Image (cartoon, grey):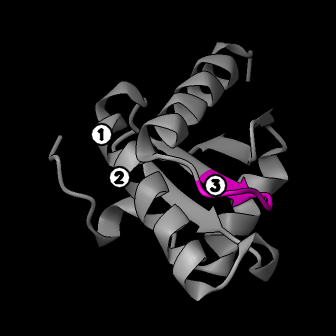
Amino acid sequence: MTSRFGPQQRLRNRAAFDAVYANRRSRRVGPLLVFVRRSQPSVCPRLGLSLPKRVGNAVTRNRVRRCLREAFRLQQQEWPTGVDVVVNVRPHQPLAMMEYAEFLREARLALLRQPS
């Protein structure tokens, strides 16, 4: 597993997001609502982010996106292969990257413990 966060590790189209939402496995942790779906086992974990304008202006939303991507990148080896993750962000004051990492870790432990 590489330590980069390239295009193959992102959910990029509406159909991919809808497939994750249709699975209906989610967990609310802090200001994040995390959805998970198991996809093809040979594919690395993929991340999709959804931030409404209510989160803040473009600068704020981009900062939150960067922090979430970095938090996911640092713990991507801990996610099983073939998992698609979508994070919906609720309005909040921007946090440090390590706080987002902790939220993702909590969601991962809770969601992957649940039976499919």
In this figure, which residue is indicated by the disc labeled 1? 74
Q: Nearer the viewer, residue 20 or 49?
A: 49
State which mark lies toward you, 2 or 3. 2
Q: What crowding class fits label 1: few (fewer than 14 Cα within 10 Å), some (14-19), or many (20 or more)?
A: some
Q: Is residue 57 left or right of residue 70?
A: right
In the image, residue 44 sits, relative to residue 4, either above or below, namely: above
User: In the image, which disc is placed on residue 86?
Assistant: 3
Q: Nearer the viewer, residue 92 or 44?
A: 92
79 is within the stretch colored magenta: no
Residue 23: x and y, percent?
A: 79, 46
In this figure, which residue is indicated by the disc labeled 2? 70
Q: Amino acid at mark 2?
A: Glu
- The answer to whether any part of residue 100 appears in the image is yes
Magenta segment = 86-94
User: Residue, x 48% and y 69% (percent of image)?
Assistant: 63
User: In the image, which disc is placed on residue 113?
Assistant: none
Q: Amino acid at mark 1?
A: Leu
Residue 74: x and y, percent?
A: 29, 39
